[in-house]
Amino acid sequence: MPITEPIDEDELEADLAALEQEKLDEKMLNTGTVPVSDSLTRMPAAADGPLKGKSKAQAVEEDDEEEELRQLQKEMAM
């Protein structure tokens, strides 16, 4: 039996996408439950040792270097 109407590729692709989405939705609904414990309300342990980071001497040294850079930039602009 010959087909009298031309096949609409866009319609077929839309139908395929809808079927794939239905299959994905069904798969997601059947995944089961996710175990939930009190890990969401539990806080991480606090650090016992000294805090890591820049020391004040390093920060002062960087500030000095930045000031020198600004002065050089001013001199070069003149």
Image (cartoon, rainbow, N blue to C red):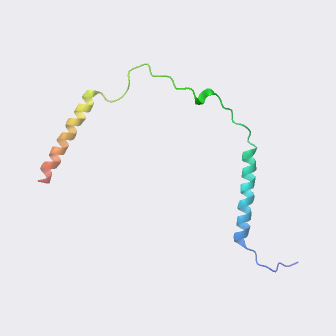
Q: Nearer the viewer, residue 62 or 42?
A: 42
Instruction: Decide if residue 54 is on the left or right side of residue 64.
Output: right
Residue furthest to the bottom: 4
As drawn, 39 above or below 1: above
- The N terminus - image quarter: bottom right
Q: Name the residue: 59% across, 30% down.
A: 40
As drawn, 47 above or below 26: above
* Residue 47, quarter of the rendered image: top left
Q: Name the residue: 72% across, 69% down.
A: 11
As drawn, 23 above or below 55: below
**How far across and how far down the image is residue 12, in percent?**
74, 68
Q: Name the residue: 74% across, 45% down.
A: 29
**How far across and how far down the image is residue 5, in percent?**
79, 79
**How far across and how far down the image is residue 41, in percent?**
58, 28
* Residue 68, quarter of the rendered image: top left
Residue furthest to the front: 41
